[in-house]
Image (spheres, rainbow, N blue to C red):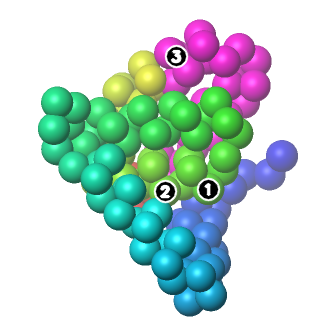
Amino acid sequence: MTDTNWPELLGTLTARNGALAAGNPDIMKAFHGIDQAASKDGALSPKTKELICLAIGISVHCEGCLAFHAKAAAKHGATREEVLEMIGVAIYMGGGPSVVYGAMALSAFDGLSAA
């Protein structure tokens, strides 16, 4: 496994998602609506929701999810310590594969929190 350039990956995924939206606008508009509804402030803060998304990205082994949600978690004020604690819970629930993707999530957070 090579070290991922997270900002570059995020740019690539954003462009690909744009192409998908151009080709299938109704689906992507609906998906964006789900994102907006699920992400808004409520009983859980947007930061907490992004940490949950990042944990799910770890458990389903989705590098793109790690990129998008690490950036969003940082945007909503997540700290490195919170990300590390969330990774610990993801590892507890997901075992060895979550160790690998947890390390990738931390790399994504570190690579995108300053961007």
What amino acid is found at the position of numbered circle 2 in the picture? Answer: Phe
Q: Are marks 2 and 3 in contact (CB under 8 Å)?
A: no
Q: CA distance from mark 1 to mark 3?
A: 20 Å
Q: How far from the left and from the top, in percent, is residue 73?
A: 35, 45
Q: CA distance from mark 2 to mark 1?
A: 6 Å
Q: Select label 2 or label 3 by which is in front.
A: 2
Name, please, the residue furthest toward the left.
42
Name, please, the residue furthest toward the top.
92
Q: How far from the left and from the top, in percent, is residue 31?
A: 46, 63
Q: Select label 1 or label 3 by which is in front.
A: 1
Per the image, the residue denoted by label 1 is: 64
Up-down relation of residue 33 to residue 74 (above or below): below
Per the image, the residue denoted by label 2 is: 68
Per the image, the residue denoted by label 3 is: 88
Residue 92 or 19: which is nearer the viewer?
Answer: 19
Quarter that holds the C terminus? bottom left
- What secondary structure predominates along the stretch shown in magenta? helix
